[in-house]
Amino acid sequence: MTQRPRMARPLAPFALAAFLALGAVPALAGYDEGLTAYQKRDWTSAIREFRPLATQGNAAAQARLGHMLFEGLGGTRDDVEALKLLNAAAASGDSLAQYWLGSAYFNGRAVPKDISQALVWFGRSADKGQPEALHAMGEIHFNGLGINKDEGRGIEYFKRGAEKDWPPSLDRLAQYSWDGRAMPTDKVKALEYARPAAEAGRPVAQFIVGVAYLLGQGGVEKDAAKAAPWFRKAADQGHPQSQHNLGVMYLNGSGVPKSQAEGYFWMALGAERAPANLKANYEKERDAAGTRLSPAELEALRGRVALWRPNAAPGQPSAQVVSPASRAPMPPGQQSATTPPPATSGKISSGSGFVVSADGVVMTNAHVVEQCRSITIKPQDAPAQVVSLKAKDSANDMALLKTSLRLPEVARFRQDRPLRSGDEVVVIGFPLSSLLSREPNVTAGVVSALNGMRGDPRHYQITAPVQKGNSGGPLIDMSGNIVGIVTSKLNAMKIADKTGDLPQNINFAIKADLARSYLDSNGVSYQTAESSAQLSVADVGERIKRVTVFIECRME
């Protein structure tokens, strides 16, 4: 099967690296021209050729035209027409359309988010051998994205994707074979998986190949000169461990010409992007390298670091169509080796979160920390700190942040009686922080319904006022216990546009049961308490303010 180049989906919480797979299609006038343009990413020409064929009911043309309209490729984005085309093509059995339709349901894009429907369409596409769908099914089962986690079944799908030479699936198998996660440790086999994925531009696979040559593992001879180019390829894409390793090699002249300046430069980039478990060591080694440079050299190099931006691999944009919810352990003994989010135009967004464990884990919404290059939190009574992403579940809009906070108390979840419609609740967060102060904002309301939008059983509907920036903050009962996570508000203007009526205070929160299950699945210890005392809104606010944090996401 011919592969298709990956297309950027900057807001997609579940994004698999997707190539424009061709599949078996009838040869019709204009189709070959459209397909050639599509492969070359000449979207305007592809749309011109495919549109009349799609009107005639050609499923392959409908699938590709639907994909382009869905992604806004060629300058025109039309979710309604795209969904109509994808539905028609998927019903006709086009595997690419089935994959994109599954992605739409998984992401809640132009349709209500529905994991069961996503699995239906991904499954149908996977049954036809579509590599994107096989990989999607692997990610869903391996990471438990909206379903029960089953790493063994995920591996089976990754293997089927690898049989199609699908780089993302090869990349996953390389990681897990190297580390012995969900499959036996086999560095020789890991390297077999890693090589084609590395050639296709996957930075983690490139890192594995580099480590194999650097250490003489996986059945290859130790050869620093062969390791360096692979670290450089991954480093150019922003892979922090590869950047650090490359910097050390420059300092020592191992496999590359010796250079204090280049060593410092790459080590500084690695330290800037390092996961939390490596950051302190990387910064220490970077600073040690800096002592051998003059102040003028250091200033110049720091300026170079500030201006540096990651590159995409050849033929591959830096964003992807699905990002796994969990980070895979990396060789040797290193973790969170996923590529950092692609560079953006320097935007900053904010949200709220709350401390759920004695070791400082903060819970928030996944959409609050999507696309963040760096995440900073600020508790009420402690200084701000840069933190790392511990886990993310985009399907259910939950994320965990790893911090160094050690607070005297943490949030407690309600352990007894379930909430009822009409029960009073309190919301605490940091709405509109660019306009208002960064003091926690306390609002009160009631649970107006036990299900969310379109009857979603994962959510409560609440009347407590919610603004932009409240997302990820706690929903609290009148005993001061957590009963949910604030996640969204109804778009009043859109509803007014459709109905002529302006709705007030229709907001939603993820139920605490789902949040607790997520904490359990990630091995996070949390506290519970009975909800018997009836406190005032002010008292609840005072108690929970101490464990609520302001979250700032920098997308530089």
Image: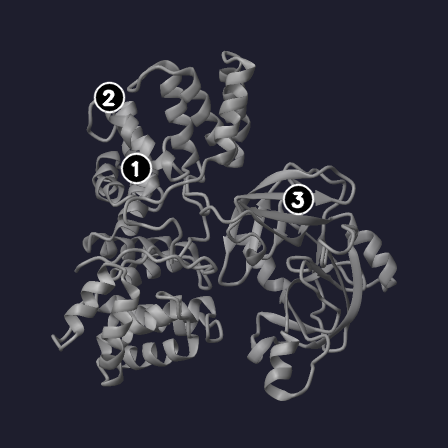
Can residue 333 be seen by looking at this rendering? no
Asked which secondary structure carries label 2, the reply is loop
Distance in Å between CA atoms under marks 1 and 2: 16 Å
Q: Position of residue 93 (x, y in %)?
A: 24, 77
Tag 1: residue type? Gln
Q: Position of residue 133 (x, y in %)?
A: 30, 63
Question: Label 2 amino acid?
Answer: Lys
Report x, y in % for residue 300.
Answer: 51, 23
Task: Identify the mark at residue 222; answer none if there is no mark.
Answer: 2
Disc nearer the start of the sequence (1/2): 1
* First in sequence: mark 3 vs mark 1: 1
Q: How many marks?
A: 3
Outermost residue on the left side: it is: 27
Pointer 3 and pointer 1: residues touching (CB < 8 Å)? no
Give the residue at x 36% y 57%.
Answer: 16
Disc sitting over residue 206 in the figure: 1
Residue 292 drawn at (x, y percent): 50, 11
Q: Is the C-beta separation of discs 1 and 2 under 8 Å?
A: no
Numbered circle sitting on residue 377 = 3
User: Which residue is most to the bottom?
Assistant: 500
